[in-house]
Amino acid sequence: MKKEMTYIENVYSWGLRWNMVVMVILLAFPLTVGILFGALPEWGGLLLGLLNTAPMYWAVGVIETFTYIPMLGAGGSYLSFVTGNISNLKLPCALNALDQAGVKVNSDEGEVVSTIAIATSSIVTTVIIILGVILLVPISPILNAPVLEPAFAQILPALFGGLGVVFISRNWKIAIAPVTLMLILFIFVPALNENRIGIMIPVSVLFTIGFSRILYRKGWL
């Protein structure tokens, strides 16, 4: 008699399958367009370009895998890495949902809550993008109005500020060190703001773990 798969086993099985399908689709689209329009790249140049740039993305991909999965859970991680925009959308949605439900991501309930939150975020994002494409021309004068420009510039700070207040106030002793470190680095090393955010996240995580360990050993936690 075949053993029935558990929820997590099903997540891994279907998550792996759909990630492979999406990878094939993503790679097939530019290849198909190149064939149809006779615009295939010069493969030697493409390989040389990949050798110069791909290792950085491999490193970031490995780092983000170990950083995000403990916060997103298995199902949420598969969904997030397929749909993208993890740090700006998927992670805040998952963390807020877990906080509202009062569960941990490493629990069965947390796994389900995180997956539903990220799936909902993906659906809402897709619907908004579709509406944006359809309504782009009619609402362009409103979106480009100078009076709204300061508001659009503060969307992400407002999002992470709201989440930060919740989590920092809960563990303010732990939050002091990483917040201070990141402020110093990004203020005095502006180059870090350019395409290096993915690398700085694990740096902050490791620094926070080390600092928390020191506080714990001193009995301050």
Image: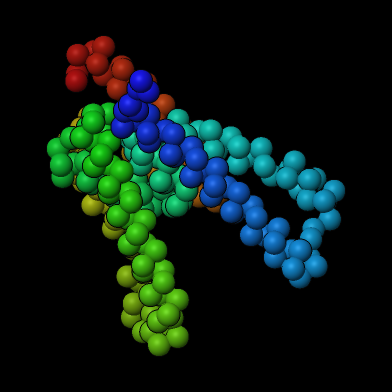
Left or right of 30, for residue 189: left
Q: Is residue 93 visible?
A: yes
Quarter of the picture containing the N terminus is top left
Q: State the residue lying farthest toward the top.
A: 217
Percent of width and height locating residue 111: 27, 36
Percent of width and height locating residue 196: 53, 44
Residue ID at (39%, 63%):
126
Quarter of the picture containing the C terminus is top left
Residue ID at (54%, 38%):
61
Q: Is residue 150 above or below residue 194?
A: below
Residue ID at (27%, 49%):
117
Percent of width and height locating residue 92: 31, 48
Left or right of 118, for residue 219: left
Left or right of 49, for residue 79: left
Most foreground residue, 54 or 31: 31
Q: Is residue 25 above or below residue 3?
A: below
Percent of width and height locating residue 201: 44, 38
Most foreground residue, 36 or 199: 36
Q: Is residue 181 visible?
A: no
